Amino acid sequence: MCMKQMLLKKIENREIVVGVVGLGYVGLPLAVEKAKAGYKTIGFDVQSAKVDMVNMGQNYIGDVVDSDLAKLVQSSMLSATMNFNSIEDVDFIAICVPTPLDDHGQPDISYVKNCSEKIAKFLKKGTIVVLESTTYPGTTDDLIRPILEDGSGLVCGEDFYLGFSPERVDPGNLVYKIKNTPKVVGAIGEDATEVIASMYRHVLEGDVLEVSSPSVAEMEKILENTYRNVNIGLINEIAILCHKMKISIWEVIEAAKTKPYGFHAFYPGPGLGGHCIPLDPYYLSWKAKEYEFHTSMIEASEIINDGMPDYCVNRAVKILNRFRKPLNGARVLVLGVAYKQDVSDYRESPALAVVQGLLNGNALVDYYDPFIPEYRYKNRIYKGLRYFNEDVLQEFDLVILTTAHTVLDYEMIAKNSKFIFDTKNALKAIKNRDNIELL
């Protein structure tokens, strides 16, 4: 029996053992779904705290149901380890490690490279390897393939299958989870594509689209997030212009939304956050230079979006000046440091840059976020307010709302704040707006 038929049969019979490398916002939910679908799953991570929590059935990711994780661990369908020797025991490996930018804004694929080298040492014949981490086109074929072949002595396409299937995770989304979000699969060879797509179809409810190569799938993922980056950059620029013209950008967007075709609403804010949207366009811009091509539109949107935290700080300075209050020594409360509402994820959150900008101006800054009691930024730990009530609000000269958490009492906030700079239109339902200014 050929490798393809053997693997398809093992997938059908739930005999595949799954390995998920990286147990973060993408990896842990994926591992849970694989195990729930009847595949014994082993999670790999270099952080002992995550491994220990998984093995104790303790959840740390918002999109994972606590009881699901506990049940899977108790039934031995899901376990975690720091020992990469166990790669020998798995048939399907999903790589879900971070792909950040380095200090110079260049793609940092060291996590992908390092875990590929570890996998190569224990890779056996008949294994499927799939990269899910977002990266530049060519990573799977040009970087991972030679690492796996050189480190294992095996041949891609003959002894093992290799492909790319981009993660599509939207933390806090109440409708679309890993289970029901369509999947894209691109692999090296038609057989690999068929087998990898079959594996995902046996686990997920969403459609699985097969594309012709890993590079197509890699570019597809970059396009998804660059599309959002560029459009958010556009709306942020329009928001700045509207403020100068004394026009409400929020009212403009609501009017434009009435058109049933040709317009999709994007909203302004203090900048971009999360792992994908602020970072992915840099991967594409970096790769484009290899072809002597400059992604001018993408780079322009990055400039606008990256400048929004400073713009918000400058707006805050002007608001305080109206009250004859300098930023130096002003008490400012930043409401929300998560990168989006109702999540505990602050990766690349623009609110962190807003806080830093205020501190650079010698403001006395506190923050409150019901989901994030403390955070780390530029090698420093910031602790949020433990208490948040009417009396606390009245102590501040200015409140800057940077994350529109739905659990906050905006009536109470509006009533007890001296002045609010609302960068997210979170207080849109408040009728008395004398102490509110919108972005």
Image: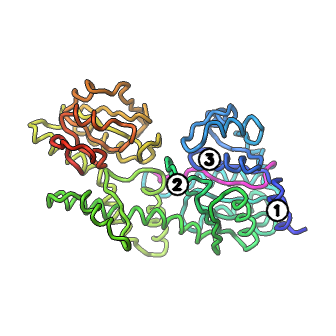
Report the magenta residues as a range: 89-102
**2 and 3 marks in contact (CB < 8 Å):** no
Residue 173 screen position, x and y as percent: 50, 50
**1 and 2 marks in contact (CB < 8 Å):** no
Residue at point 79%, 50% (across, down): 17
Residue 297 vertical position relative to residue 338 in the rendered view, above or below: below
- Who comes first in sequence, dot 1 or dot 3? 1
Q: Which mark is residue 29?
A: 3
Task: Report, in whole angstroms, how far the alpha carbon at label 1 lies from the one at label 2.
Answer: 33 Å
- For disc 2, the neighbor class at 10 Å (few under 14, some 14 to 19, many from 20) is some
- For disc 3, the neighbor class at 10 Å (few under 14, some 14 to 19, many from 20) is many
Q: Which mark is residue 108?
A: 2
- Who comes first in sequence, dot 1 or dot 2? 1
Residue at point 80%, 63% (across, down): 154
Q: Which mark is residue 7?
A: 1
Residue 274 vertical position relative to residue 211 in the rendered view, above or below: above
Within the image, what quadrant is residue 390 found in? top left
Q: Is residue 223 magenta?
A: no
Judge left or right: residue 289 versus residue 138: left
Residue 190 screen position, x and y as percent: 73, 74
Residue 419 screen position, x and y as percent: 19, 38
Mark 2 falls on what kind of element?
loop
Residue 22 screen position, x and y as percent: 63, 47
Q: Is residue 93 magenta?
A: yes
Judge left or right: residue 157 versus residue 183: right
Mark 3 falls on what kind of element?
helix
Residue at point 30%, 31% (across, down): 366
What is the magenta segment's predominant secondary structure? loop
| Tag nearer the camera, 2 or 3 | 3
Q: Amino acid at mark 1?
A: Leu
